[in-house]
Image (tube, coloured by chain):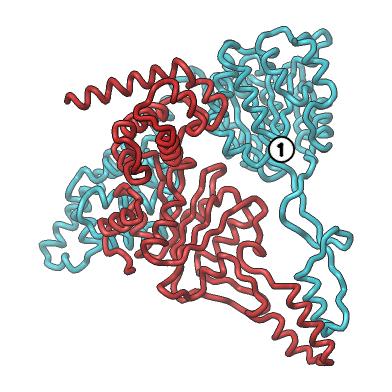
Chain colours: A red, B cyan
Amino acid sequence: MRLPDDIGATKQLLQEGDYIADRSLATAVFLALSLERPLFLEGEAGVGKTMVATVLAETLGRRLLRLQCYEGLDVASAVYEWNYSRQMIEIRLAEVAGDVDRERLGKDIFSQEFLIERPLLQALEPHDGGPPVLLIDELDRADEPFEAYLLEVLADFQISIPEIGTIKADRPPIVIITSNRTREIHDALKRRCFYYWVDYPTAERELEILRLKAPNADIALSRQVVGFIQKLRGMDLFKLPGIAETIDWTNALTQLDALALNPETINDTLGTLLKYQDDIAKIRGSEAAKILDQVNMELAAERKG
Amino acid sequence: MHFARALRAAGLPIGPGRVLDAVRAVETVGITNRQDFYWTLHAVFVNRHSQRELFDQTFHLFWKNPQILEKMMSLILPEIRGTEDADARDRASRRVIEALHGGSEPELDPADEYEVEFDAALTYSPAEMLQRMDFEEMSAAEIEAAKAAIRRMRLPLHQVATRRFRRDPSGPRINMRDTLRSAMRSGGSSIPLIRKRQRQRPPELVVLCDISGSMSRYSRMLLHFMHALTNDRDRVHTLLFGTRLTNVTHYLREKDVDVALDRIGEVVEDWSGGTRIGHCLHEFNRDWSRRVLAQGAVLLFISDGLDRDPSSGLEAEMERLHKSCRTLIWLNPLLRYEGFEPRAAGIRAILPHVDQFRPVHNLESLEQLTKVLGEPVSRRAEGVTQWQRKAA
């Protein structure tokens, strides 16, 4: 697939992958694609940051390389590692054959053949169908040294391996970096990226997403669900429900053959929506019923209007 | 670009590289409508969630004048300029920009608004306030000595293992990479094993310190202590609270302690006021805990536990706090008094949710604290249960 020519086409492209994006997000994606720069997506958990990368890979027909970050992530698991056991066998075989030409052995052993490539290195290599999509997920979980290492990779799209030399990408991969903001990412890294804060969707957009992602759900039920969740997001909760939770909840309700929300079903399924006991305790019972009443009233008013 | 300068004046950190980026970005997108233009610049100039509001205001004020947009276009699309007429328009619009830039600067700068708010909140100069917060019973010389002692203090936080490795001759695992390298040196005829061991590093340290009226005698000393902590190691976060919560980590990184304290005196608005521990903890749990406690931090909670409003869900918030960190150590200056009894409602609400309960009123207690932090962190250390029984 060719890269989109303008913002509208970018939005269309995302939509083809069942991702409903704001025009503002499409702008950021378009910029990242056309200027070949990483896109930094920040936002609460479950608002669809990771989805952007998977959808882009899918619709553009590119390979998706995913690097999940964690504390202590190091070069060996992010960039490359040598296949030591195979190298050992190679050395033993050389010994048995009585071949001790050190220089040649050295070259043989540290060649591409024995290199185990991890996502960052894979991303720099030529791929059929164009550069891959490199997803660096939850960068905030990695520690600062790794972040600093990334700086170099993202600036020049090259990696040096002492035994082989420098590997440089002919065309830079499409890089999507996500962060849940469990800590701030250093400005030096953000400066090299286009930045976008992924927010909770508006009721209208959320309903659209729900129609796509949970097509079996009753439309009246979907409306109620979206109304209910939008109300929850306005409340003082420890963890607000994201889009992922909206979809899960709707699917759960459909599984239970619910055609409309009522206080009992809400109480029974609240666990798919809220992930902290404190929050559940706060909403369960009368509070849920109250919110539901409000939602129903608003929906009724909408229908009349 | 003037817009970049306006943004910089409004407090966004923008370098010349970013301006070039912006021009390239706008060229790529093209100027077709205001909304796309907005989001294009947004993607380049904003890189923190908190900067959004600032950007938004500056943008709307700045691009209100349509002539500026024209000027923008003439800057990035040189081919549409050309005749003298266009040049004249160019000059005119530059004057407009300068006028706009100079004339409405206070409006452009929402940061100023906040400052005005601070001034209104404080009826006296913050610097004076800090001056009065000295340790009452100490002479000036003693204070100096104490400060020096605090500066010398090193907190050997007990280390935790990370997933990274370092070379270590007696390490438990084999370092394959280096083993193979050294095997190559001998042509593979011998393979000396090289070992490695997991790297260790201290856990993050988060300090939550009460600066309300009842704590004011200790505040300055404690600030010195926190300053020493912050500059001694990475990954220390400090938040002050009284009636509201302020993150002062950034200011404490300032190397010179007096400059740091002056800056803090300026930004913190609730020195020596009342305490709303429950409210502040709620704010901390909601906005900060996932950001600063995510990697298993040790939490120092410094407060006398005297809450003006103990019914405000303090206990629930304390429980949440306790569950989100590695160890919670409560430092309470009231513990210095012989006959201290955990009677106050606030104290009784906090006590069930701490792992250690220690005094903090003089240098000796601070030194003891450094010892405790050097030991393996554990939940429920000696001494706490006895207090908890008393409080129950």
Give the residue displayed 39% in from the left and 59% down from the top.
A56
Reading the image, the residue beneath label 1 is B229
Q: Can the viewer see residue B28 in this picture?
A: yes
Question: Picture coordinates of residue A222 (x, y %)?
Answer: 33, 34
Vertical placement of residue B252 versus B241, above or below: below
Give the residue displayed 65% in from the left and 40% down from the top.
B256
Which quadrant of the view contains residue A92?
bottom right
Q: Secondary structure at mark 1?
A: helix
Question: Picture coordinates of residue A21 (x, y %)?
Answer: 33, 49
Question: Picture coordinates of residue A35 (x, y %)?
Answer: 37, 65
Kind of residue sitting beneath label 1: Leu
Q: Quadrant of the C terminus of chain B?
A: top right
Which quadrant of the view contains residue A115?
bottom right
Q: Chain of mark 1?
A: B
Give the residue displayed 57% in from the left and 16% down from the top.
B313
Vertical placement of residue B69 versus B325, above or below: below
Which quadrant of the view contains residue A201?
top left
